[in-house]
Amino acid sequence: MGERTINQKSFKEVWEKINVPFPEEAYEATSAGQRRIKEKCIKQRLDDVFGCCNYDLLIGKPMLEYGPGGQNNGRMAVSCRIAVRDDSGAVVCIKTGMGIAETLEGRSVTALARMCIGDALMYCMESLMHVKATCMVGSDAVNLRKGGAVQCIAGSDSAEAALYLLKITGKAHVRENFGYFVPVEVKGGRKINMYIPFNLTESMTAIEQDKLLNSLMPGLEMQAKAVTDQVEDEQVLRYVSAKCRT
């Protein structure tokens, strides 16, 4: 049986090409004080690497919901799905993302939808690239780094995992279609969830997986390597590796 290919390229070549750093001009500022890769640049990368016939991109219908306060207390959500296929037509991987934004006075529904679509597509791309496609700017980034947190630009030096000092504050739980979530407290008092994706534990043996999950008990202090990530509308720490703090 011959080697599986995508767009006439080996898997190794494809994933190397999808992870090539985006140029500076591929980024745009967002209203949330972040930068993200432009939608058109993401689509061009997908076409260039996978070929237009080797992936499906599905953008869901924007869903708008208002709360008790009417139009000034609402939220829009848009889902995105990228399915990559090899040259035989077999699905290689499926990545999903969700863009969520709150309604604000003066912000049109169209602008809200474009914002959510851009975010949803960006989060799918992050999953494919295994790095952050957004970067916090200004004083917020400095404050996060004081606690060990870093938001990474795809392909930059900061895309390496940062070292955190963590204390487990609760038991790990499973969130369907995503992975394991462990409530932790970052040095400095910031409380957040540590996220262990299913695709990480799938590469482990059953014994290794049980050993990892059973070790994450409340009260445990550890040094963990992680990068900040976004799962649904929640900012989390994506687990890379960890050891008990000495």
Image: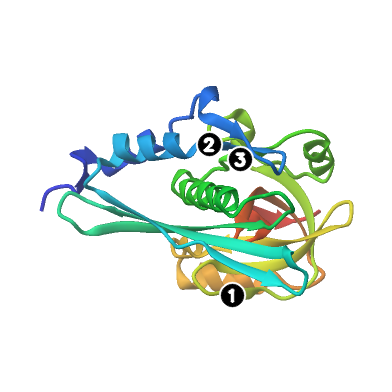
The answer to whether any part of residue 71 appears in the image is: yes
Q: Are marks 2 and 1 in contact (CB under 8 Å)?
A: no
Where residue 215 appears, as percent x and y from the top left, is: 67, 70
Q: Residue furthest right?
A: 188
Category of crowding for the residue at label 3, using alpha-carbon neighbours closer than 10 angstroms: few (below 14), some (14–19), many (at least 20): many
Where residue 15 appears, as percent x and y from the top left, is: 36, 40
For label 1, the residue is 174
Could you tell me the amino acid type at mark 1? Val
In the picture, measured across the screen, residue 14 lies left or right of residue 114, that is: left
Q: How is colour applied across the structure in the image?
A: rainbow
For label 2, the residue is 37
The answer to whether any part of residue 239 appears in the image is: no
> Image height check: is 123 above or below 24?
below
Secondary structure found at label 2:
strand
Which residue is at 64% across, 68% downward?
A: 181
Where residue 27 appears, as percent x and y from the top left, is: 56, 31
> Image height check: is 104 above or below 66?
above
Could you tell me the amino acid type at mark 3? Thr
Secondary structure found at label 3:
strand
Viewer-proximal residue among 241 and 144: 144
